[in-house]
Image (cartoon, grey):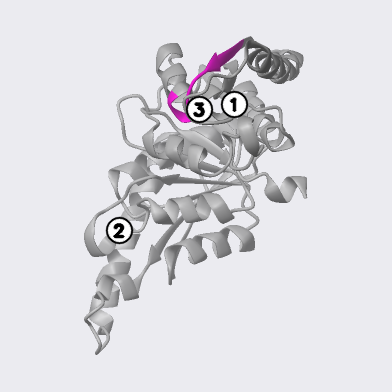
Amino acid sequence: MYDSVLVPTDGSEHARRAAEHAVSVAAAVDATVHVLSVVDVQAAAGPFNAGGVDEAFVTRLEEESAEAIDAVEAIAEASGLAGVQTAIRRGRPPQAILEYADAQDVDLVAMGTHGRTGIERYVLGSVTEAVVRQAEVPVLTARATDRSRVADGYEDVLLPTDGSEYAAVAFEHGIAIARAFGARVHAVNVVNVADLTPRPGAAPSEGVIDSFETAGETATAEIATRASAAGLETVTDVREGPPARSLLDYADEQGIDLIAMGTAGRTGPSRYLLGSTTERIIRHADVPVLAVNARGATD
């Protein structure tokens, strides 16, 4: 499934939590772990430093990056992983991360959705989202929450679907991870009734709702069939409501340990795997989210 896993880190608590999940997955599939820290000299210097920075300043930044890498290496060693590959790069973090992933033929990137504040910030928000949007490989994101602590792997994996080919690429990864950990697969479709109305305040007909629910049942049944073929226990559900909120509520109710979903899906009434919804879930989920950029895989 994955032969190599890249962990970008700035030493923050959220980056360490993502590293813990990366190490857990790598151990389960016998993958090599790469740890990368990017020194963004321009951002660290600030917008008013027209005279540039001296070498001592850059050296201090690189020392901090080395400490961040050491922390991830310690996590890997504690899990029995050997041969961790490490690197420090200078440049803009999203570009450096994507270039390293491409050069090293990385199969999975794992990074925190929040990082340090101030001049050392680079794992926070926009950088992670930039990597999620542009990476050609899946990106596992995590926040340091009580729910995201790594215990004995994953027991319940949530796979949202709208029946599109984009979703299909994502749940292939989700099922593979679930199989590696012997997890239960939850296939969920959300019918956003608000998107089915011709105008604000109008109610869709029962026939329209029924047709979308039937399509949702078909989509979730497809996942259940594939997961069952892999020897996994499955649960299916079709719900009505705002997609992101409904999926987050389901994750809380069912004790989900990991959400795996695509970054592009259908447009129009059933759209919820596209862009903003996935990003909203990444920002707010208390559990890790595996985001699969399926555009390239389906072109």
First of labels 3, 1 by sequence position: 1
Question: For the residue labelled by badge 1, is the local secondary structure a helix, a strand or a loop?
Answer: helix
Magenta-span inclusion, residue 242: yes
For the residue marked with disc 2, what is the amino acid? Arg
Q: CA distance from mark 2 to mark 3?
A: 30 Å
Q: Mark 3 near mark 1, Cβ–Cβ under 8 Å?
A: no
Hey, which quadrant is residue 284 in on the image? top left
Q: Which quadrant of the figure has residue 66?
A: bottom left
Distance, label 3 to label 1, CA atoms, is: 13 Å
Per the image, the residue denoted by label 3 is 243
Q: Is 42 located above or below residue 94 in the figure?
A: below
Residue marked by disc 1: 196
Q: Nearer the viewer, mark 3 or mark 1?
A: 1
217 horizontally vs 151: left or right:
right
Between 174 and 65, the one lying in front of the other is 174
Q: Nearer the viewer, residue 246 or 76?
A: 246
Residue 145 on image: x %, y %: 31, 31
Rate crowding at label 1 as few (under 14), some (14 to 19) or many (20 or more) other CA atoms within 10 Å.
Answer: some
Residue closer to the observer: 74 or 264:
264
Q: Quadrant of residue 159?
A: top right
- Say which amino acid is labelled 3: Pro
As drawn, the label of residue 121 is 2
Q: Position of residue 116 (x, y in %)?
A: 27, 53
Vertical side of 117 occupied by 20: above or below? above
Q: Which residues are magenta?
A: 236-245
Q: Which amino acid, mark 1?
A: Leu
